[in-house]
Image (cartoon, rainbow, N blue to C red):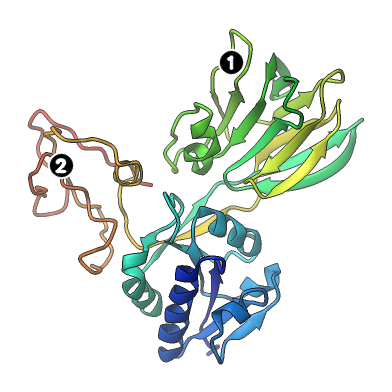
Amino acid sequence: MSKRSVLVVTHTGRPEAVRSAQLVVDRLSEAGICVRVLDGEADAIGCAGVDVRPHTAAAAEDAEVVMVLGGDGTLLRAADITRTSGAPLLGVNLGHVGFLAEAERDDLAATVDRVVTRRYDVEERMTVDVVVRRNGAVAGTTWALNEASIEKAERERMLEVVAEIDGRPLSNWGCDGVVCATPTGSTAYAFSAGGPVVWPEVEAMLVVPISAHSLFARPLVVSPRSLVAVEVLPDTPRAVLWCDGRRTLDLAPGARVEVRRGAEPVRLARLHLTPFTDRLVTKFGLPVTGWRGRVRQPAHPSPPMADSQVADAPSVGGTAPEVTSDGGPPEPDGGASGDQRG
């Protein structure tokens, strides 16, 4: 039987993340699990006995899980490494909102214990593949978990583009850019640009113009089977393509950016089967006082964690949650509770 391995990815620019990584390494090692760290992070973590790997996709090969200590940016960086290996990402939020993270800093020890005992579920998140063409030839390829955004590179002038869906032209936009996002990315850049929040299990792509001068410039939700193309018009300033705010490619006038559903999903480890609605309330601090529905348990609750776990359904209206004995939905009483899963 091969030895269990866990890759730890850390935002070493944050002292708290380094201390957290040291705790994770110690607890995993005590449990007999081989701990891998990236070569650019090993010196900062400074733990003996770790398996130092180069910052490539090979670092995640055969890893049971990848623990990510930082914010969403750190998790997106880790996704670059893990996507082809299929190793699930387990994010511990040490940043601000941390929408992609599964646990918070106060749950760190309990989270490690869940990894040791293999008490987590794995879900797949849709990605997008991106192809840039120039004069019909491929000028570059990349991918994104959150979004591919075409943005103007010069502040002084608007970007002139034409959008195309499934081979048919849709509209011209004079704008600051266009965001093509996944449901996962709907709470990131697309959200800031005025796009809708899309539940993660919904299979779709979003097209969100940024500050467009047009009567028809609303966010669009299109089929996951669609091909979305954004062409930079010839007489327009140069543009730039950003994917997940990390990978970038310059776009000359006349460039064409094609976005379609990705061939490789990203896998996320989940400790809690918390409804996505509750995540929105918790992460954005949404006001729900006065709600008179009932909080229900997930149909298949994960084993309990410490009292501080972030997945506890929020108490609303100052009253304790009411749950039916079998964990199913309560009888209607004028309120309603959803069964959406994030």
Depth check, front residue: 204 or 243 = 243
Image coordinates of residue 146 in percent, x first then y, are 57, 44
Instruction: In the rendered structure, find residue 77 and report the number of the disc placed on it.
Output: none
Residue displayed at 35% across by 46% down: 283
Q: Which residue is mark 2?
A: 316
Question: Is residue 173 toward the left or the right of residue 48 in the image?
Answer: right
In the picture shown, does residue 85 fall above or below 7?
above
In the picture shown, does residue 285 fall above or below 197?
below
Mark 1 secondary-structure assignment: loop
Mark 2 secondary-structure assignment: loop
Question: Is residue 128 toward the left or the right of residue 125 in the image?
Answer: right
Instruction: Looking at the image, tell me whether mark 2 or mark 1 is earlier in sequence order.
Output: 1
Question: Is residue 55 toward the left or the right of residue 192 in the image?
Answer: right
In the picture shown, does residue 29 fall above or below 45?
below
Depth check, front residue: 266 or 173 = 173
**Label 2 environment density (alpha carbons within 10 Å; few <14, some 14–19, many ≥20):** some
Q: Which residue is mark 1?
A: 217
Tell me the kind of residue under disc 1: Ala
